[in-house]
Image (tube, rainbow, N blue to C red):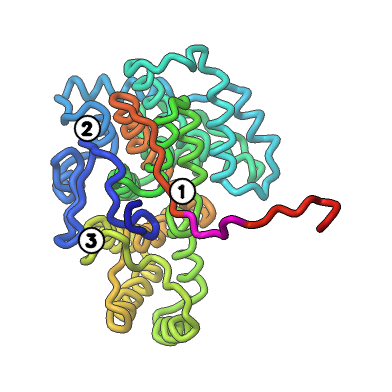
Amino acid sequence: MPLKSYGLEGVVAAESELSCIDGEKGILEYRGYDVHKLAKNSSFEEVAFLLWYGYLPKKKEFEKFKNDLRNRREVPEEIVELLKLLPSTTHPMIALRTAISFLSSFDERLEDYSEERNMERSKRLLAVFPTIVAYFDRIRNGKEVIPPDPHLNHTANFLYMLRGERAGEIETRVLDLDFLLHAEHTMNASTFTARISASTLADMYSGIVAAIATLMGPLHGGASQKVMEMLLEIGEVDNVEGYVKRALAAGERIMGFGHRVYKVMDPRAIELRKLAQELGEYTGDLTWYEISEKLREVVYREKGLHPNVDFYSASIYANLGIPVDMFVCMFAIARVAGWTAHMIEQYRDNRLIRPLQRYVGRKNLKYIPLEDR
């Protein structure tokens, strides 16, 4: 029997060519490309291409790819009607999960597991995630849905459908880079869930629904929502010291800090920190960024912990006007690129993922018939 490993820490569950982390040095690479260089030079759509096809596209190839995605953005009218049936109090991630499950019923070749077909599904899923999220937010607020604009890129189109007006160039670029930085991150909980589903030969929609459900947890994708709730509770910079000391004295977790793998600052947080400041300066509201900076300073002094990817994402989403309960949806819109890439990789060289467990319960109990108990 293998040695016990809490939370599978240190256990290699799969081999992958998609991404690589060096937690000691704070390095993250997508298919061999440093994430800092990609953030400086690429876009989210280009990274999705890289994850799926294994290389960076040439210009004409990339234009064709973007047009392909744009042509897949709209959802069946039945999906819109489904979203209208959901109570307005429904969490947006539940709406997304439900809609993607329903979307599978429109796939007439659901049992076709060919890589070509799964690549088509991946494009479809990436394209419709923003549409579903934007549509549901408008529906729950009593507004008419705004159809996708084929003239806008992935991120600009999402903000347009959500707001009803075109976003500024800086806003679009900041969110695009946020998506790029969330696109893939090795064997995290939701990705592992997607791969487990693929290993059973469940269809791609089923695996993505399972991944969405896993991402909702506050110790995974839901952390950015918890970070924002914390920032709202703190309210202003002068309250940071007292908040942190009270929370630590009570044994409470400071959301957005620490990471299972990184022993130094998360490289994604390094990029997001710059973006949060830039966006705050653009909108004229640095409140959340300044509170975040003070939190970073105090938590490191008190606990030696660095911010993770969720920490600065919260202030970015807040300054973009995205509702707090939709923060985790932003994560999902980006991470579906990685989820689908992992599922394709799992299907390609599949073996059912079936770990062992260590039984620690009672043994050899004497059975007593019901009438004698």
**SS assignment at label 3:** helix
Q: Position of residue 245 (x, y in %)?
A: 42, 86
Is residue 282 visible from the viewing direction of this image? Answer: no
SS majority, magenta: loop
**SS assignment at label 2:** helix
> Sequence order check: which comes first, mark 1 or mark 3?
1
The part of the chain drawn in magenta is 359-364
Q: Is residue 127 above or below residue 112?
A: below
Question: Label 2 crowding class (10 Å Cα cut-off): few <14, some 14-19, many 20+?
Answer: some
Q: Is residue 204 above or below residue 12?
A: above
Q: Residue at x 32, y 57 (%)?
A: 3
Q: Residue at x 38, y 26 (%)?
A: 122
Which of the image's four quarters has the C terminus? bottom right
Snapshot quadrant of residue 51: top left
> Sequence order check: which comes first, mark 2 or mark 1?
2
Marks 1 and 3, how far apart at CA: 22 Å
Q: What amino acid is at disc 2? A: Leu
Q: Residue furthest right?
A: 371
Residue on which disc 1 sits: 215
Marks 2 and 3, how far apart at CA: 22 Å
**SS assignment at label 1:** helix
Q: Position of residue 27 (x, y in %)?
A: 17, 54
Residue on which disc 3 sits: 270
Residue on which disc 2 sits: 50
Left or right: 368, with 335 as reference point: right
Marks 2 and 1, how far apart at CA: 23 Å
Looking at the image, how many numbered discs can be counted on the residues?
3
> Sequence order check: which comes first, mark 2 or mark 3?
2
Q: What amino acid is at disc 3? A: Ile
Left or right: 47, with 241 as reference point: left
